[in-house]
Image (cartoon, rainbow, N blue to C red):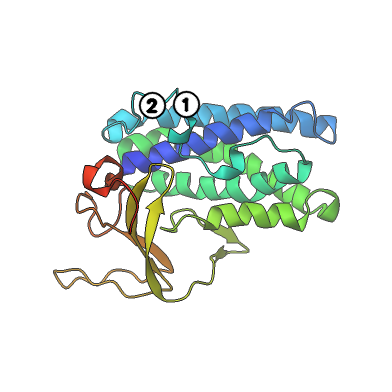
Amino acid sequence: MSLADLVLALADNKQLLGLRYAEWAIRAPSLEADIAAAAMGLDELGHSRVLYGCLDPVGADPRGPDREADPGTYRNLPYFDRPWTEWSQFVAANAVLDTAFTALVQACVEGNVDVLRSRLRKMLQEERYHFLHGRSWLREGSSSVDEASLAAAIEESCACPGGRLTVVKDGKPIDPALPQEIGLIQDSLKNCRGPLWVKGGITIEGADGKVYEKRNRVTLCRCGESTNMPFCDISHLACPHMHGKDE
């Protein structure tokens, strides 16, 4: 995944998160929660706007001409696809997914890309309030969030095969227990063959002898066109020879 792809995915998720927050501006359990939902929704929509504006400076804009007509081109988590029917779903997204997105923003701010360091810094100040809001509702216990909704949000954050989105709880990352195996990913949305999926902390050594950091889950290029070899940067989406399904 290129830097522009990462920024686009973060922007899409923040845009959908902002819309879902805003839907609760008059439906939350209290007036204070109504106001918080509206304020956080505006924050997230503003963040997505800033992130979209960073696409050209960090590389080629990955958005295609069919972007507005095809919702399937959005790179958001499925958790945001439909309106939430329970307040607990709001709290789970606020406490888990919003915090995970903030970790990605912080990584960009602490990185070496000047446009991201300068433009995203203010987001961290606003996200501090989001974190406190989510934590306060979690402390309310079962009256604010049920285990099923919280588990669903964590499952969404752990669904990325490459492990780029990781939830941290009590200072420790929440990561699924995966067996040591290598599989193939089929991108059903785009009807094409995806990357190799390496799971369970298998050691990866490059052709030049370089040994990469051992990770629980990572995706490796299978199309031969990645600009971040040996890792997948979703270049397979534009490769005619990757269209269709594995036999």
Tell me the residue that label 2 is attached to. Answer: 53
Report x, y in % for residue 180. Answer: 42, 76
- Residue 40 in view of the camera: no
| Horizontal arrangement in the rendering, residue 210 relative to residue 164 (left or right) | left
How many other residues sit within 10 Å of disc 1, few (<14), some (14-19) or many (≥20)?
some
Q: Is residue 89 above or below residue 60?
A: below
User: Of residues 93 and 194, which is closer to you in this image?
Assistant: 194
| 59 sits left or right of 27 in the view | left
Residue placed at 57% from the left, 52% from the top? 156
Query: What element does badge 2 sit on?
Result: helix
Residue type marked 1: Arg
Q: Secondary structure at mark 1?
A: helix
Quarter of the image holding residue 56?
top left
Residue name at image x 31 percent, y 38 percent: 114
- Compared with 174, 146 (above or below) is above
- Tell me the quarter of the picture where residue 98 sits: top right
User: In the rendering, at what x and y percent does residue 210 appear?
Assistant: 20, 70
Q: Answer whether labels 1 and 2 touch (C-beta < 8 Å).
A: yes
Q: Residue at x 37, y 37 (%)?
A: 116
Q: Which amino acid, by three-letter code, is at mark 2?
A: Gly
Location of residue 59 (image quadrant): top left
Instruction: Residue under label 1, please give it.
Output: 49
x, y (%) of residue 123? Answer: 51, 36
